[in-house]
Image (cartoon, helix red, strand yellow):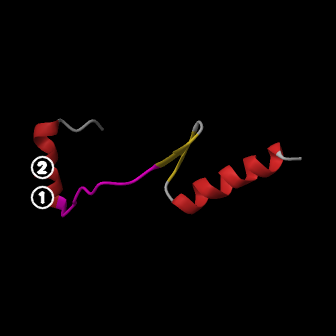
């Protein structure tokens, strides 16, 4: 279902939905929702390069 921007506010009001900004952490080609996950992958890559 594609929501037309003009309908978005009406639908959000009707169902009590709110929109909030969401941070994403980008590391190389990957996207993470937590900094800890991004750091864990970066540290794994670092360890693999140093072997």
- Give left or right: position of 17 versus 24: left
Q: Residue at x 84, y 47 (%)?
A: 50
| Along the viewing direction, whichever of 16 and 1 lies nearer the viewer | 16
User: Badge 2, how many Cα within 10 Å: few under 14, some, many 20+?
Assistant: some
- Give left or right: position of 24 versus 47: left
> How far apart are the alpha carbons under marks 2 and 1?
6 Å
- Give left or right: position of 27 versus 10: right
Majority secondary structure in the magenta region: loop
Give x and y (percent) for residue 28: 59, 38
Query: Mark 1 — residue?
Result: 13
Q: How many marks?
A: 2
Q: Residue at x 58, y 62 (%)?
A: 36
Q: Quadrant of residue 49?
A: top right
Q: Residue at x 27, y 35 (%)?
A: 2
Q: Residue at x 66, y 50 (%)?
A: 42
Give x and y (percent) for residue 33: 49, 55
| Along the viewing direction, whichever of 33 and 41 lies nearer the viewer | 41
Q: Which region is colored magenta?
A: 15-24
Give x and y (percent) for residue 46: 75, 48
């Amino acid at each position: 279902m594609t929501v037309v921007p003009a309908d978005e506010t009406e639908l959000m009001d009707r169902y009590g939905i709110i929109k909030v900004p969401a941070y994403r952490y980008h590391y190389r080609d990957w996207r993470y929702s937590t900094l800890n996950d991004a750091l864990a992958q970066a540290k794994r890559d670092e360890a693999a390069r140093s072997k």
